Image (cartoon, rainbow, N blue to C red):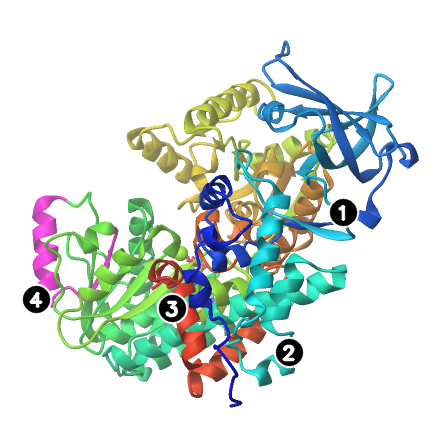
Amino acid sequence: MTAVEGPAALSWRDLARIGLERLDSANPRRVSALAELGVEHVGDLLTYYPRRYLDRSREAVVGELQVGEDAMVLATVETVRAAAGRTRRARVEVRVSDREGVPLRCVFFNQPWRAKQLRPEMQAVLYGRLDVYRGALQMTNPVVDLVGNRTGGIFAVYPLSAKAAIGTWEIADMVAEALRRCERRGIADPVPAGLLAEHRLCGRSEALRLIHNPESSADARRARKRLVFDELLRMQVVLIRRKRERQRACEGIAHEPDRELLERFERRLPFELTAAQSRTVEEILTDLSEPWPMHRLLQGEVGSGKTVVALMAMLAVVCGGRQAALMAPTEVLAEQHYLELSELLRELDGAGSGLGAGAGRLGLGGLPPVSLELLTGRIRAKARERILTGLATGDVHMVVGTHALISEGVAFDSLGLAVVDEQHRFGVEQRAALGARGASGGLPDVLVMTATPIPRTAAMTVYGDLDVSRLDELPTGRAGVTTAAVTESLQQPAVWERLRTEVAAGRQAYVVCPLIEESDKVEAAGAEATYEELRAGELAGLRVGLLHGRLPASAREPLMASFRRGELDVLVATTVIEVGVDVANATVMVILGADRFGIAQLHQLRGRVGRGSQPGWCFLVSENPSPLAQSRLQALVDSSDGFELSEIDLDLRGEGTIMDSRQTGRSDLKLASLRRDRDWVPKARRAAEAIVAGDGPGPALADEIELLLSDADVDYFDKS
Ligand code: ADP
Ligand code: MG
């Protein structure tokens, strides 16, 4: 290491100790406005990154624009008028002129605050499409940046809330001062120089200077790349360190799966495992035999055959004398899993014994019977008592249930494996609680199953401390689904014709109503209207049921049951059918207002048909002509691979679909985007792996991680 002259370069912690009021450019209004934006100290300020850059060389003047063209115009506000309007929509009309004095009208709908934000003589940059309305040039709902009287080639535009009492140019002033005053000591760079060289990344000081004051867009990209790498690297170091620590610190159970028994089980299955299933089972068995607790995520879309994989893991544990639990997010799903497991076990048991009344003891090809129980809130007190006793004594080997499994009074004799279905709905604490149930001798292994395929980079980030198995292959022998995007009303009759043909052939259909996010109530009303309309029109004469979220469970279940029994031809429903509906005889899925659903959700819905031996049909009905909507629907027409679709979704919509705002908001990922930076995620992961496997992150990087990734953030990412 070279000796450093004078005081050491400023670390992140140093910067976090310098209050904003120490800047000459600060004043109480600015400081409190920044506090509202979450900027408390100089460290925050330097990482309050521009939302975008304004490149003055791209500035247009109205006189040279074509109607229909997208443009950026620097303009001076002339008049502002808020029109109450006859309709309910708030409308603010702003007249501006560009630097040549050419007038332009801007109309803002549903943004009443614009009337307060924009004042005569203000300089504003408008981004929007030029159109003509009643002979005058106009932009409707342009994006607006208030920039003050700034000059120069490229300048940063900072994200502001509508109410923030600070201008973007004021932030720029303060950032410039902060950067200037850091120059003497310099800003420390905790990332090893070799790593930076390997990835051709610039130094941190330079990156911070350029991200705020680039001279070209290439500068801004270079700066961003470096800062993105830092964010991803910190995150990955945390995730990988956690994974290793857990392996080292926690005592697990080194199961000894009985291979011969599992092979016998496999041979007696009515189908052959897919290659993906075999690979996954192998991965799990290897984990089970390790002395540390498994934390594995099993990803596989609906129908990919997760249940049998889970059951094989459970059997491996149970035959070694431990217990296994499967926890589902809802009672319906728990019951469904219970039935599926019973069924699979019964196959092995030969014809005779099956699910007996009560205990459900199941034989396993000559071995002592495996006892499987269901524990949900619906189980009556007496049965519950019996199951609880069985769990405590070890007489019950496998249990399927809901939250009831982790409620007061549930104790296992020796829980060896917890399988958790759909991690999204379970909090960290709940999973920990189930883990803690394995009282004697080591923490149980945990397998999390999810039906939502997510892109690789997202899996690395969101579940970076879990091992991930992917069931990326559907069992064969399925007739598959033909998907069509129906975007013109002329094509719609063909949809209903197909539906009626299928029903005439004895099959069933779903019609999904448009998604209405406003409220359950509005959605239910919409569904009711659709139902009435269809029953009187396209579906006249068919036996049609209506299912929506406002129906009480007491009405919902009989309805589902009669659909299952084939007493209804068509089920008109809201997305409540997403959860736990499995009717093999259903072959048609019509999704109305399909453009309102996300790709993942459409794919999930589509998975409800074509699961049996009969080919399925999925119609995505939408009258939304927007290119984005169209390309999403087209993606579903083109691909039936959930993983591939998740990548496309990421491309089209960004990570909002994967990481909700709360999650990204709380994290250290300010710049990094799983979409834009997808190549950088694995690079950062590899670098982090090397760091953790080597001498560790070093004190500077370690300190920064501790500071920037608070426990709360990390826990959120730590899905286990
Ligand atoms: P998932 O839980 O992933 O949605 P399931 O495990 O419920 O899927 O499996 C869906 C259906 O496919 C079940 O009826 C199951 O018995 C069947 N199945 C599972 N694996 C195979 C396979 N390898 N070949 C044929 N059918 C399979
Ligand atoms: Mg299943």
Q: Nearer the viewer, mark 1 or mark 3?
A: 1
Residue 393 marker: 4
Disc 2 designates what residue? Answer: 199
Which element carries disc 4, helix, strand or loop? helix
Callout 3, which amino acid?
Answer: Glu
Residue 100 lies in what quarter of the image? Answer: top right
Q: Quadrant of the C terminus?
A: bottom left
Which element carries disc 3, helix, strand or loop? helix
Residue range in magenta is 380-402
| Ligand 2 rendered quadrant | bottom left
Q: CA distance from mark 4 to mark 2?
A: 57 Å
Residue 692 lies in what quarter of the image? Answer: bottom left
N-terminal of the two: label 4 or label 2? 2
Disc 1 designates what residue? Answer: 151
Whether the residues at callouts 4 and 3 have beta carbons within 8 Å, the answer is no
Tell me, yes or no, whether the highlighted magenta stretch contains residue 270.
Answer: no
Q: CA distance from mark 1 to mark 3?
A: 40 Å
Residue drawn 61% across the image and 28% down it = 117
Residue 140 position (above or below residue 359): above
N-terminal of the two: label 4 or label 1? 1
| Residue farthest bottom in this picture | 1
Q: Nearer the viewer, mark 1 or mark 2?
A: 1
Callout 1, which amino acid?
Answer: Thr
Q: Nearer the viewer, mark 4 or mark 1?
A: 1
Residue 52 position in % (x across, y down): 67, 50
Callout 4, which amino acid?
Answer: Thr
Residue 401 position (above or below residue 367): above
N-terminal of the two: label 4 or label 3? 4
Callout 2, which amino acid?
Answer: His
Residue 469 position in % (x across, y down): 46, 70
